[in-house]
Image (spheres, grey):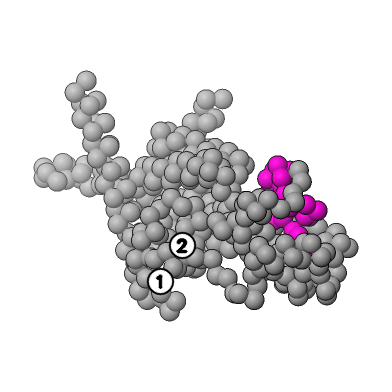
Amino acid sequence: MKRFFEHPLFLFVLRLFLGLIFIYASWDKILYPAQFAKVVYNYRIVPIPLINLFALILPWIELVSGLTLIFGIFTRGSALIITLLLFIFTITAAISIYRNLDILCGCFDTAGGRRVGVRLLIEDSSLMFLGIWVLLKEKGMWGLDRLREGIFDAYRKKGEHYGAKI
Amino acid sequence: MSTEISRTRSITLKVAFQVLIIVILSSLLGIGSNLIRRDQISFISHSSDFVKERKTEDCISLEQAKERFDNGTGFFIDARSDEDYSKGHILNALNLPEEDLDRRIDEVRGLIPEDSEITVIVYCDGEECDSSNRLAERLKASGYTNVRVFFGGWNEWVRAGYPIEG
């Protein structure tokens, strides 16, 4: 069982899954930043002057880290960002439930989507654990990081062969 | 042992570097895309950007709502969750969370026809919540012409000591 969960193919599928979710989630927010800013405002967590900037940058972080996670560029870095974001989303959902806020998630859809509730909390936290798993176990199988490192290694060896130091 | 420590340190540094690159790249993309798009938003936001849009013809005050309640010319719809509704609501109000509208539209039409003289009065918690606003919009889209939002909502109604149940 352990071997299955640590199998490079399984980890690759996880990367693909998390990456696609983040890319999908970023799209609507990138297209409609003003609407997304309203969603952010409704949560009443980000200070008001910073809301627009936050609404402009967060979706791009989601998109870039989703893409880099899938392609295996900066795999650990993007896995860390995705895990941290999911941690923040989980905490935010918990705070909103605690404060009894009647708001819509805005997770995938700036027009609102689902209501913030316990289900969202469970989804976000489970995704976060997947993120932690990827962060700990991922070895960059089928990723461009490995390819790049491989090329560097090959050059280094070649350099040594010719007696040069790189 | 010391090589183990230095290895961990170098991985940490590497991941931190990757995170930094992704965040900087995303920030540039977010800010840059806002600069070139036609419907730009300002980088510093003000609370006026987010205040609920309310057209005066769509609103109804506490007094007006009570008047319609008393003479039976108002049909109250509670846009909050089932949970909040069961804790207490305006007497005889129908519970209709926004997400249930599509499923229950026929039931609503059975209770009150679209072209009824009776005013449909939608409310949620109060000033802070937005679900009454959204439900009213969707009711209008479904053909209802005589819809008003009671912005004071449940909180104002209770404070005034008007009839409730639940």
Specify whether A29 is left or right of B97. Answer: left
Residue at 83% from the left image edge and 74% from the top image edge: B117
Residue A12, percent across and down?
A: 49, 42
Q: Mark on residue A117?
A: none
A94 or B163, nearer to the observer: B163
Image mark 2: chain: A
A2 is higher (above) or lower (below) than A155 = above
Whether pointer 2 and pointer 1 mark residues with C-beta atoms closer than 8 Å, the reply is: yes
- Give the distance between the C-alpha atoms of the residues marked 2 and 1, in whole angstroms: 10 Å
Residue A159, percent across and down?
A: 16, 45
Q: Which residue is label 2 attached to? A: A37
B24 or B113, nearer to the observer: B113
Give SS at disc 2: helix
Magenta stretch bounds: B74-95
What is the number of callouts on the image? 2
- The reply to the same-chain question for discs 2 and 1 is no
Q: Say whether residue B25 is magenta.
A: no
B155 or A17, nearer to the observer: B155
Three-letter code, disc 1: Ile
The quarter in which the C terminus of chain B is drawn is top right
- Residue A124: tell me if it is visible: no
Specify whether A52 is left or right of A165. Answer: right
Q: Which residue is label 1 attached to? A: B41
Residue A6, percent across and down?
A: 48, 31
- Residue B157: tell me if it is visible: yes
